[in-house]
Image (cartoon, coloured by chain):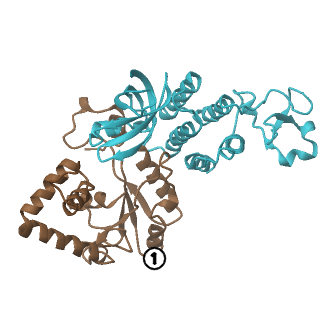
Amino acid sequence: MRWSGTGFVLGFKKYNESSYILEAFTEDHGRHKGLIRGIHSKNLRAVIEPGNEVMLNWSGRLESHLGNYTVEPIKLWSSYILSRKINLHGINSICSIIISTMAEKQQNAFIYEKSLSLIKDICKNKEDWIKSYIFWEIDLLSDIGYGLDLTECAVTSEKDNLKFVSPSSGRAVTIEGAGSYKDKLFKLPNFLINRSSEYNDEDLENALSLTEHFFRKRFYEPNNLNFPKSRNHLKISIIK
Amino acid sequence: MKSRISNPEIDKLILLISKLPGFGPKSASRAALHLIKNKEQLMVPLAETLLSSSENIVTCEICGNIDVNSPCMICTDEGRSKNQICVVENIADLWALEKSEVFNGLYHVLGGTLSAINSIGPDDLNLKKLIDRIEGEKIDEVILALSATVDGQTTAHYVADTLSKHSVEVSRLGHGVPVGGELDYMDEGTIAAALSARQKI
């Protein structure tokens, strides 16, 4: 079996003296692994950095086999951000969340497009990339079946003045709806409802805490997985 | 049918050699035969050296380098500048820097880099000892000589953040055009890094 396609690198593990097991998120085959030889090549080492956009050629006797990859660079995005700490944490966080949440060998064009676009924004250091990152996490939560409902109040069904999110249902709540429980609810930053609205560092922290909670409670903890350390590093560097 | 050309002793020798980097079963057989043929000149001295190395080589309690003494030769060398520490990922990197003969300070071996995919966190690195050294010794500068990779630079930023609470200057190696590098063969990221780190001449 053979296929060729585009994707971006998620990471690699050393397999033996001269090979790596490369993990990539591909456009047509989802998260896919393959053996890659010749790791002592300086050119290859620079290509297989997390976040880099690559053309992959995979071959294997059966689809279920690990198979072999050959890889050619399309754009070495990660090399643009080596001196930018938060951007590096952003790329690491995207790659580790995809590795832990996306099923292997299952195409997911929606998340692929969103992720690649976000990687480009991060590597070009676009102004609002952290906001885009938070929306990417919300889209990912929704895609894996644990979406948040921020359209109306879970208590009063009102569509305006949504200020909180329920940690159990993931639904928005108004001040009136929250009543005496507001200390137990997550604060809902306004930019999550109205994307073009202004935001500050506190809003970013609240939004990151919100998505972290639902990732942890609904996906990582039930599946006995550790929440990615790189995501914690990202949050800490943004708060600072 | 069991092979008649080998015996357990030779098989064990081949098996052990084949575990060394760069060796497979075939090349291990060739090496074993070469050792057996040159028993006095090569095999016995090699065995003695291996035994003595395994008994004497230790990891330096200060920097993480390997030597026959702890503290190692570099840490105890009076001729070296004691106010600079160069942080490296592993001992091979330390050797590469020493070979260049351009750095005359002290070293600190981290023992790896932070890695999202391999789940290597700050607690898995030799960081606490570095902080202890900075607090206990008169260190003016820490040079982060880590790889120009996502993991290497994530680690560099993490170490720099950790050291920001201490009154020590933290620098990192320059990124850009390598010696002998031709621009038209270079990737866009390297060119971008080289441009942003340009210097006046």
Q: Nearer the viewer, residue A42 or B28?
A: B28
Query: Residue B77: image x %, image y %?
Result: 26, 76
The residue where tag 1 is placed is: B136
From the viewer's perspective, tell me whether residue A195 is left or right of residue B91. Answer: right
Task: Pinpoint residue A148: horizontal percent, then vertical percent.
Answer: 75, 32
Q: Position of residue A73 (x, y in %)?
A: 35, 28
Chain shown brown: that is: B
Q: Residue at x 26, y 75 (%)?
A: B73
Q: What is chain A's hue in the picture?
A: cyan
Horizontal side of B69 relative to A208 (left or right) equals: left
- In the displayed structure, B194 sits above or below B52; it is above
- The answer for which chain carries disc 1 is B
Mark 1: which secondary structure? helix
Q: Is residue A107 positioned above or below A24 on the image? A: above
Identify which amino acid the numbered label 1 is placed on. Answer: Gly
Question: Where is residue A139 shown, x and y percent of the image?
Answer: 65, 29
Residue A205 at least partly seen: no
